[in-house]
Amino acid sequence: MSEQSTATISTVTVSINGSSVTVPEGASLKDACGVAGVEIPTLCWAANLTPANACRLCVVEVENSRTLVPSCSRQVEEGMVVQTDSERVHHSRRMVLEFLGSSVDLSQADDLARWSKAYGADPDRYGNSPARIEEEIKIQDNLYIRDYDKCVLCFKCVDACGDDAQHTFAIAVSGRGFGARISTEFDVSLPDSACVYCGNCVAVCPTNALQFKSEFDLREAAAWKPEEQTVTRTVCSYCGVGCNLEMHVQDNTIVKVTSPNDHSVTNGHLCIKGRFGWQYVQPVATE
Amino acid sequence: MADLHLTEDRASATEVAAIDAAIAAVSLDPAVVHETERLVRSGTKRKNDRRHGLLPALHALQKESGWISPGGVNHIAEVLQVPPAEAFGVASFYELFRVDGAPDQEDDVVHVCVDAACQIAGADQVIADLEAAGKQVHRSPCLGQCERPVAQFIQGRRKPDWVEADAEDELWNLPQKHDPSLKLLKRVGRIDPTSLDSYVGVGGYAALSKAFALGADQVIEEVLASGLMGRGGAAFPTGIKWQGVAGESGQKHIVVNADESEPGTFKDRTIMENDPFALIEAMTIAGFATGATKGWIYIRGEYPLATKRLEGAIVAAREAGFLGEGIARSSIDFDIEVRRGAGAYICGEETALFNSLEGFRGEPRQKPPFPTTNGLFDQPTVINNPETLLNVLDIVQDGGATYASTGTGGSNGQKLFCLSGHVNRPGTYEVEFGPTLGDLLGLAGGATGELKAVLLGGAAGSFIGPDMLELPLTMEATREAGLSLGSGVIMAFNDSTDFPAVLTRLAEFFKNESCGQCVPCRVGAVRQHEMLVRTSANPSEADSQLLNEMDQVMKDASICGLGHTASTAVRSAIALGLIGGQS
Ligand SMILES: Cc1cc2nc3c(=O)[nH]c(=O)nc-3n(C[C@H](O)[C@H](O)[C@H](O)COP(=O)(O)O)c2cc1C
Ligand code: SF4
Ligand code: SF4
Ligand code: SF4
Ligand code: FES
């Protein structure tokens, strides 16, 4: 019986930069690269979301394919020959990083800064005043802020709010092309929208375009010190589901709450109570 | 879907009536569409069998109120169970929907084309005159009427949309009328496109009878043997698509891609306005051959006459028993619905078209999977261009081998070309594959003035010089020259052309039409346009080098053909010396 069930797990063998790796059928090329020990830069991919396929940072070269392919979502096929280090791959990744750097505020996107450096991206070579995503910061409540100047349109927040986690659909992509923005209907304020303040969109945002208000206020006061923060894991006390919480604490004060991506109950997603309901531990002074 | 949260805005009584009527006219039949699975971002699944009523509902709201009002969106959201943020996201994707506030004028909106053929014919002046006359004017991308510039389309307020030129002379665009060598266009001008009897009177529906006699498998064999290749731009073998879908099971679809928005293209409009029954018969044959029972025509929103003719033809065919259950006294079921686009070039990309029809944003899906297995509503789908399908009638009648013996061997059969710009007799021309570029220009009466360049294949194609007049316009010869026939566009430019202006507008077209989904195209198309503006379309050596780098990432890493081809025409113009090179 057990022999039979192991026999039915099909595997696929592909070549990554010349070395052969075997992975389960249905794995992505990115998974296969991981097995081969090759790091793939990603922006719109996340372990707890369906691949959005939009940023194209993860592209690799597959033999006999006219274009490069997104490794985050392309499934392995038997005998694929993959190059992750070719000049073509480097060129595309560098250009994607340059395009983003020239149009979006990436000052708080740490991963992107690291890759931009690694790939030698020079976002300053597009003339004196290249068009940018210019948006006013939206502060509409005390829980989180939206600074779409920093938005790379990775779709992560939309999918976290929608099909992939929350099923609230408070936000969507509106407009087209360079004018596309993440927005509620007619850009109504969050309190007027369907938002239930689960904060799952904030947790997945890779650029800090979405930011907890607690973090935003500290940054404004130049008092945000991630290197001094401790993270303590606990279980949410509100209901019986058993969500794991990570309390980020700075100067003996809770500054934000996340949940581990690999936790089987939450997959990183929480509800308003676990995410924001910690004032009873730490009353907020009202003036 | 969870309970929807709606703002307090309420639709007016007239908005409710207009929206409800539009939705009632759509078959929201769960037996046909039992599940819509969204694959835009490869794999997200959502059940919602009403969502494909969204585009028709938005059209009705726009017509009633002159914009997409918050109250109207709330009503649509409730009836179709679509989250309002998503309904807004969809509405804001389209040119024909206004989302930024009620218009301050009550009258109709005049859309004036500003793309190449109309640009060189004086579109700016026409717009200035209309504005001076107090009209609501919208600068539009190509309206598919390049043979009669400056093209206009009028979006009626509380009345149907129309095109002024349609009323003047509907056959104006067929200079070869009554030429006995015509095959694809042989009925144009000979039949009354509103009369099924007239169509049957010249042999209409004989091909369907023949198809029934041959049997489904043999029809596919004939299409395979014909070597017919798609006429929508990608030149994929039609028989292979059909065979793929025939081999699938479950609900299947035939979709006609009548979005025709590639600048310079208007041939499909010629077919649909003048010979609508032929397209319907060809779709029915495709349905019979592949086992698909549901047909859809997705037609661009700016083709009111073609839409009216097709809708009329479908009703007539249904009444006569050629559509519906047990068509033509057989046991085969097949029926067709027409869906109007709302102004978006990208919705001609096949997977963007599926999303648009399903009620999602017209964003292309990553391929694979391909439409033959995961098409409309994630079900097996044949998607073809109208011209492609028209060829099937003769293939079925005369046999695939006979068809394959015409043309050049590498390119079989007949081909439609759209001639516009600086030629004496612009219009849709039909030839058997073989003639050269010079021959085609000759058919159209030659260039007016001194010919400087030809845009071959559309905005996604390339500029070539007068030294290429000997180029045979076949798939193989163009491929060998590093070119593409695309959708059959031949746009001529003479020595009076302001090429910097034409190229700057062309770059603006791609900037405006990018769906915005992927980084290379969303930003690359903007940077390309900025460069042309910044340099007054006189890019330096270094600029050209940067343009090549941008082209490379758009070709390599964009999701769809729009990004892949966004720089092709600009780079060809630089190579040809039409722009740049002057310091
Ligand atoms: C940006 C873009 C726009 C397109 N527009 C059209 C169109 O308007 N009509 C069309 O038939 N094909 C269009 N295509 C090609 C379609 O994706 C598809 O290949 C075609 O409809 C298949 O039909 P065929 O095999 O009969 O040519 C477009 C492709 C791209 C990338
Ligand atoms: S907080 Fe939750 S409900 Fe609100 S927009 Fe973000 S994901 Fe959606
Ligand atoms: S707000 Fe953040 S998560 Fe949402 S699309 Fe923009 S960058 Fe991505
Ligand atoms: S290439 Fe352009 S049009 Fe195509 S999916 Fe990407 S952004 Fe959209
Ligand atoms: S990580 Fe693969 S496309 Fe963004």
Image: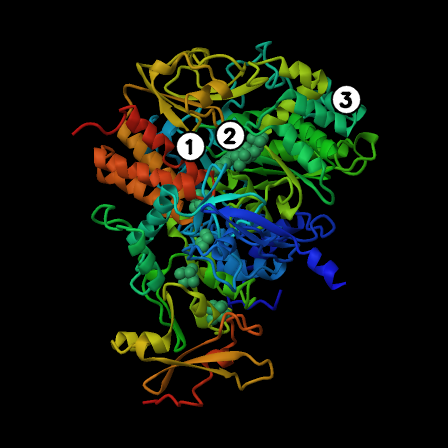
Instruction: Give me the chain letter of mark 3.
Output: B
Look at the numbered disc 2 and give the secondary structure of its residue: loop
Residue identified by numbered label 3? B210
From mark 2 to mark 3, how far is it between C-alphas? 29 Å
On whether disc 2 and disc 3 are found on a single subunit, the reply is: yes
First-in-chain label (1 vs 3): 3
Q: Tag 3, which secondary structure?
A: helix
Residue type for callout 1 = Ala
Disc 2 target residue: B233
Q: Residue at x 40, y 73 (%)?
A: A144
Question: Which residue appears at 60% of the width and 13% of the height?
Answer: B406
- Total tally of numbered discs in the picture: 3
Q: Is mark 2 within 8 Å of ligand 1?
A: yes
Quarter holding the C terminus of chain B is top left
Horizontal and vertical percent for residue B280? 67, 30
Residue placed under numbered mark 1 in the picture: B460
Give neighbour class at mark 3: few <14, some 14-19, many 20+ (Cα, 10 Å).
Answer: some
Identity, as a three-letter code, of the amino acid under mark 2? Gly
Q: Is residue A106 visible?
A: yes
**Is the CB of the residue bearing disc 1 within 8 angstroms of ligand 1?**
yes
- Disc 2 and disc 1: Cα gap in Å? 10 Å
Which label was assigned to residue B404?
Answer: none
Q: Earlier in the sequence, mark 2 or mark 3?
A: 3
Q: Nearer the viewer, residue A10 or B87?
A: A10
The residue located at (28%, 25%) in the rendering is: B578
Who's the residue at 37% across and 88% down the image? A284
Looking at the rendered structure, the kind of residue marked 3 is Lys
Camera-near label (2 vs 3) is 2
Q: Chain of mark 1?
A: B
